[in-house]
Image (cartoon, rainbow, N blue to C red):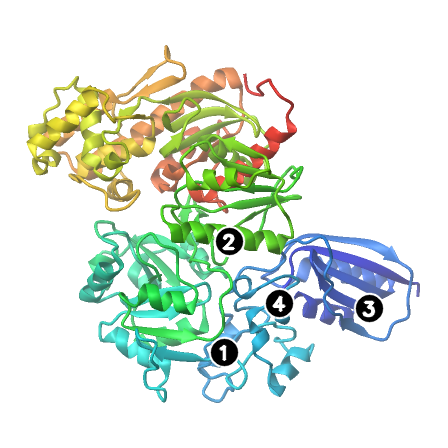
Amino acid sequence: MELAGRKVRVSGISQGVGFRPFVYRLACEEGLSGSVCNDATGVTIEAFGSRDALDRFVARIASESPAAARLDGVRTSPLAFERRTGFEIAASVHGAERRVSIPADLATCPECLAEIFAPGDRRYRYAFTNCTSCGPRFTIARDIPYDRPATTMARFPMCPECRREYQSPADRRFHAQPNACPNCGPRLRLIDCANRTVRDDDDPIRAAARAIIEGKIVAIKGIGGFHLACDATDPAAVRRLRERKHRDEKPFAVMVRDAAEAERLAHFTAADKEVLLASERPIVIVRRRRHAALAPEIAPGIPAVGLMLAYAPLHHLLMAEVGRPIVMTSGNLSEAPIAYRDDEAIARLKSIADLFVMHDREIVTRCDDSVVRVIAARATVMRRSRGYVPRPIRVAQPFSRPVLACGAQLKNTFCIGVGSDAYFGPHIGDLENLETFESFEESIARMERFLGVQPELIAHDLHPDYLSTAYALGRSPVPAVAVQHHHAHVASAMAEHRLAGPVLGIAFDGTGYGTDGHAWGGEFMAADTADFERLATFRPIALAGGDAAIRNVWRIALAMLDDAFDGAAPLADLALFRTIAPGEIEIVRAMIAGHLNAPLAHGVGRYFDAFGALALGLARANYEGQVAMRLEWVADPAERRRYRFDIDRSAAPWQIDLRAAVREAVRDLRGRVSAATISARFHNTLVSASAEIVRTAAARLGRIPIVLSGGCFQNARLAESIAGALSPRFDVYLHCSVPPGDGGIALGQAIVADAKSRKSAGGRVCA
């Protein structure tokens, strides 16, 4: 028998998922000696034994790794044979090169769930039960490598029984860093708004459940921050939460105990159910059942609901006690970041919550719940946060130097590109107040520390007034690169699908700053990672009052009507304008006609606002995207007709002209055609116009890949219909793991900035 040695380097998500215990067991089964250890880039193994056993060992590492592991590579090199005694898990090595190899936080596994509901088990009803297959990871990590001393569990010394589990290779808690039990681990307590303990002898979970059943609002400290919870079947409780949180109509997420309860509330496809049960445990957007036992106030005006399963032991225990669905929304005031520190939670949420369920395991990184919707039978991440962060996106061409991309103003996330990986930070939110901006700065600093990098290039949006732009420019002397908003959208889809370009990018959203200083948002562009050519857009609509028009969508509808009817639209026949004072209409008309604070916008999102306002009679939007969302969900799936449109090919770029469509939609409204039919015909019009532009552009560009990106492609009907109209003649790529909206734009910024930095001055790639 020929003896040899093998050094094995494993990269990817390999820490905190039971990978070293897995390697230990494999080595013992194959009769190998040696060691395995974590380091700052992944896992290093030194193994010694027969060549046949070593070959089997390496093959099994790749094929049998733990479910939560995400291996990017298993590379081997020969070692001289050494005669060692047994196989060991060695102490972690702190190297100079660092990569985040900590997994995202993992939902409670079936084995741990069984323990917390087993009366004879020593972890019965213990809210911090976990093992190598589940529990908190990223949100409790202070540094890497991922070992207990580098987490917030360091302050909880393990009791002898937990220590035995931790040290036993045969135990599923072997080297489970957050391992704990009621004797040695974190504890819960229930407090009131004055930080006073409520009934110290009572079970905090049972007491919180009673409060929820009684209609109270309870703040609950979870894995990535605080939630605000109330009875989702109680309209009065949901209204009270809305009033206190200052969240008028934006939908609330609902937590349910299991998949069976979820299916009683909403319609699930096989793909929807797969996402619901995935280890990331995101909020899944699905169509609510007509007679579901949910308060209508959960999602006013929308027949959809965001459902998620309990994903932490605390949630499972609470859901079992409450016995009904509960609202589980971010613990914040409207538009503020989720609270994650105890003192800030009490200070910020005491005006909302009646009680607080607290615990003494510190959260290091705030991490909101992720949101997913199935589009074209595939899970599409709408908000990438808990469960997905810090899992990297592998890019086709390695970054030439570390790049920080600062993202957009709304739905902000940042991205750091280093080597062949792009790391998104957790969802930040809208950069519109000091608290959110401070969270943005803190999150960037923490991710830079985890990665052990300082950016050598900073990418930012072209818009000069974005706070993310100001941050990028404030990090001088690091060079900053401005990236056009829609080019970044297209590049984010290219990066996700590892397309080098050129591509034909379709970028539809509400507003993005264009290279001409105007608001773009309905863009067709030939692009590679370094440059783009704007081929076509939509005829612009005036936004009377700028951002005020986006909130008062009747103003956008009025501008669209006056453009289509040459100022003679039949407003008296339209229900929308019966709710608006005539004097106010005349003022806005004068602003539009006189070009007074009425900038032009090409955004498809603005057309959704205008058509939605008309078809649904909605004068105002209470949150970003509300009108477009309602217009999508009301659309008749059986309607196949479309409205007329024109394409002005004399303009540069070409312009899709929807004035004929507007006139036909008004005709339908006056003829009492339903909003469902009008919505469907509007969607179909966008699909037909897009397909015609693509066919015309392809005559010059050839059969190049097509990517769809931008916030409008969170609309399943629009995304699926455009992709369907273009396939199979063209290869069409939709987003999946990267959000199509502004939450994914930072990846595109990083890719474009790096490509521009490589390129010599002058010359365009796409002519």
Separation of residues labelled 2 and 4 (CA atoms): 18 Å
Q: In which quarter of the image is the C terminus?
A: top right
According to the picture, the residue beneath numbered tag 4 turns out to be 150
Instruction: Specify whether 505 is left or right of 556.
Output: right
The residue that label 3 is drawn on is 34
- At label 4, the amino acid type is Ala
> How far apart are the two marked residues, 1 and 4, measured between alpha carbons?
16 Å
Near-viewer residue (356 or 628):
356
Image location (x, y in percent) of residue 37: 74, 65
Q: Which mark is residue 443?
A: 2
The residue sitting at 50% across, 31% down in the picture is 483
The residue to which callout 1 is attached is: 186
Rendered location of residue 61, percent (x, y): 71, 60
On screen, residue 756 above or below 109: above
Residue 426, compared with residue 545, is above or below; it is below
Nearer to the camera, 549 or 605: 549
Q: How crowded is mark 3: few (under 14 residues within 10 Å), some or many (20 or more)?
A: many
Quadrant of the drawing holding the N terminus: bottom right
Q: Are marks 3 and 1 in contact (CB under 8 Å)?
A: no
Residue 517 percent across, percent down from the top left: 39, 24
The residue tagged with tag 2: helix, strand or loop?
helix
Rounded to the nearest angstrom, the CA distance separating label 3 from label 1 is: 35 Å
Q: In which quarter of the image is residue 589?
A: top left
